[in-house]
Amino acid sequence: MTTAPDSPNVSNKRNRRRLWLGVLAVLLGLGIWQGLYWARYLHLASGYAAKVAASGLFVAGRDLEQLRTHELKPFAILDVEVDEENREVHVSAFGLFGQTARHRPGLGATLVHDDSELSGPARLESAEGVEAIRLPESSLDRLHLAALNQSVEFAFRDLDPEHPWNTRAVVILQNGEVLIERYGDSTGPDTLLHGWSMTKTVTGVLCGLAVKDGRLRVESQAPVPGWEQDGRSAITLEHLLRMTTGLDFEESYSKPGSDALRMLFDSHDMPAFVATRPLEHAPGSNWSYSSGDSLLLSGILRRTYGEANFEFARDRLFAKVGMHSARLEFDGAGNAVGSSMCWANARDWARFGEFLREGGRVADEQIVPEGWIDWMATPTPESENGSFGAHLWVNAGVPNTNQCAWPSVPRDLFWCAGFEGQFVVVAPSRNAVIVRLGQTFGEPTFPIEPFVAGVLSALPD
């Protein structure tokens, strides 16, 4: 029996119904995708806010209202609860997506994931028996002091009230003497300030200590569990230090699903998270800035020194340099968060810069191998404009060209740099160290090159 064809009206209705069903399916899919996006964003934002608030309150000793005004301002919709007795901060969004950070004295604030136990001691005492190294004051002549004051004034001048530079501290040394130091609102000589990615240079120095101990070699295979049987076995310690591992690691802080955000704010064991990443390029063939590489180094140091890992930076670096305010923070598995989580007051960051300027020497003691700091300050050829060494930014640039990061200042400069405009700049040819610490949100970033150029032009020869 032959079926009669649909009338035009019936056919049109059926097509319209299919079209609407397709539109609804697309909208439903977009709704689910958007829901997952915002769930992931709010979960990571809660982790970030909990960690920053706990560190600010219990490490730096700031109050919650200061943190709400500055560090937590982009997360105003989040609910922040402080448990002073247990030294915890819990952050959530509308009662959902909650994360908690717990502070342990001397070990910093750590995000607590599910019911995971935090590895390591409940507290870490301050180093004993080593006096902080005094930075002598300098008596500049009036002409140079006036010029230097003018350059420093530039750093505290917020030209755009809607986008302030929010400089918190500037310290300038020459020949190991303090020429000038100045502080912003709610900041003083004893205020601990977050170095963010300046911590990477601390990690590079700690690796130098392990090399001096004979525990690590830069040319050797990176001892990372699970890499033995695949192409990642070709990654060396030098690849990690120069960020030429070739690992597929997304260093983004604007995408909720990025590797960097998930590592820092949703991982109990950060090096273990990074160790799962596959190769994207052959080791040594490509440079890519990666906090993941720094955490892999932290994991290697933890496995190398075992329980002594918690005291390693304190006793072998900070106490020697006189950085008694310095604090490294640890993840839940006991790894130092060697990419991002070191705090110190401005003078101690200046002491760190002076230590780098002196080639890793303090008085008569060579702390890292002879030539280690020079090696860190040697450009990695694969990096953009030759601007990165081994966990240290450099101005040497590409040999025999005009390509360098900061064309208006000497090419022997090298520096530590961190999120929101943290800088410790070393100028060997001027025997100078320039520290700028602050909280400059977004674009434009703090104009570090003209600031450094102004300071150098004001220094005595």
Image (tube, grey):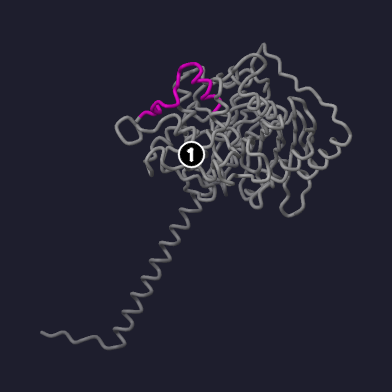
Residue 302 screen position, x and y as percent? 47, 23
Q: Which residue is mark 1?
A: 263
Residue 360 screen position, x and y as percent? 61, 22
Front residue of 388 and 201: 388
Tag 1 secondary structure: helix
Highlighted magenta segment, given as a residue range:
204-225
Asked whether residue 39 appears in the rendered view, the answer is yes
Residue 292 screen position, x and y as percent? 48, 37
Displayed quadrant of residue 149: top right
Displayed quadrant of residue 365: top right
Q: Amino acid at mark 1?
A: Met
- The residue at 78%/44% (across/down) is 156
Q: Quick check: 378 left or right of 423?
A: left
Above or below residue 167? Residue 368 is above
- The residue at 68%/29% (across/down) is 349
Q: Quick check: 445 left or right of 102?
A: right
Front residue of 111 and 285: 285
Q: Dot 1: within a 10 Å radius of its alpha carbon, few (fewer than 14), some, or many (20 or more) residues?
A: some
Q: Quick check: 111 left or right of 162?
A: left
Verify whether residue 62 appears in magenta: no
Locate the C terminus and report the quarter of the image it occupies: top right
Residue 187 screen position, x and y as percent? 76, 35
Above or below residue 179? Residue 257 is below
